[in-house]
Amino acid sequence: MGDLRKKLHDELFVGALPDGRLTFTNKFLVLVILLAVGAGALATEPGLSRRWHEALVLAELAFGVIFLIEYVARIFAAAEEPGEGGPWAKRWRFIRSPLGLIDLAVVISTLMPVVTADATMLRTVRLLRVFAVMKFGRFSKALKEVWAAVSDRADDLIVTMALAGVLLLFGATALYLTEGDLQPEEFGSIPRALWWSVITLTTVGYGDAAPITAAGKVFASMVALSGIALVAMPTGIIAAAFSEAMQRRRDQRIDEMKKHLERLDEVDEAVEAKLAALERTRNPGP
């Protein structure tokens, strides 16, 4: 029983293995989660035939059974988690933990639509399981690298956002002055013109509001061209910071490998010294 519990722990709890990789079981669970979310989204389509609806209900039931088995297995294997307390104390700790509560919410959200049709929003809770499954794996390391990169360049990004605010206000004010009298619904005030300024500066351009005067078109062109540069600025800042963070991570790994090799050299020297001492005791000189 102990061997089975240990194997389940290594398979289900990400981070239990030394390399931190996702096991086959966790990869399978991620796939099931994505399929369950897709099935839940399809179930909201009223145009589906009765046969497809029944198939989706069966799929919901199958996903719910898989998640229920996983939840029970995680509670059983939680006894292998490091820390103080006995097996049942560790299990109770897992049940009350954020990950345990997410697991329980996912089981309920998956089985509830089978019982009632008024649980559409609960289906989206399954997406939390993707993060729960990969919380302690390489996925979280990548998120930490991204967050570190953003934090390192926070001042640059704040300046970029401030510049964006200035350009938004400039565009809204310019279109209010040039187009406000002619198009009061779209540009009758600066807050109204801000909507146009946002979609133009972000290069979306829905087309629901557009200037008709020559001056308005000139200002609109300036805002649109500024938007291209403004979108590229934070992208370049974050990309450069992320590249630097990855380089620091590579340098750290190289330093760790060098230290490990130095420790191996010290061990080799100690072993050679002991062997030499043994040789001297076995073959004493005259």
Image: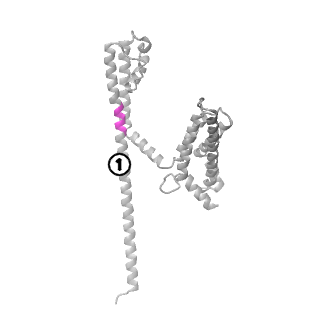
Helix, strand or loop status at disc 1: helix
Report the front residue among 116 and 46: 46
Residue 232 on the magenta span: yes
**Image quarter of the C terminus:** bottom left
- Say which residue label 1 marks: 247
Q: Is residue 89 above or below residue 32?
A: below
Q: Which residue sits at x=37%, y=46%?
A: 245
Decide whether residue 129 is among the magenta residues: no
Q: Main secondary structure of the magenta part?
A: helix
Task: From the top left corner, tell me how far across and down residue 186 is, in percent.
Answer: 43, 15
Q: Looking at the rendering, which quadrant does residue 51 occupy?
A: top right
Q: Is residue 236 visible?
A: yes
Q: Position of residue 195 (x, y in %)?
A: 43, 21
Magenta segment = 231-238
User: Could you tell me the amino acid type at mark 1?
Assistant: Gln
Residue closest to the far top: 181
Residue at point 31% right, 13% down? 214
Quarter of the image where the N terminus is located: bottom right
Could you tell me residue 272's position as x and y percent? 37, 75
Residue drawn 57% across and 34% down? 42
Decide: is 196 above or below 61.
above
Q: Could you tell me which residue is drawn at 40 percent across and 76 percent down? A: 274
Q: How many marks?
A: 1
The crowd level at tag 1 (other Cα within 10 Å; few <14, some 14-19, many 20+) is: few
Query: Extreme bottom residue here?
Result: 286
Q: Is 171 or 269 nearer to us in this picture?
A: 171
Q: Is residue 81 visible?
A: no
Q: Quadrant of residue 178?
A: top left
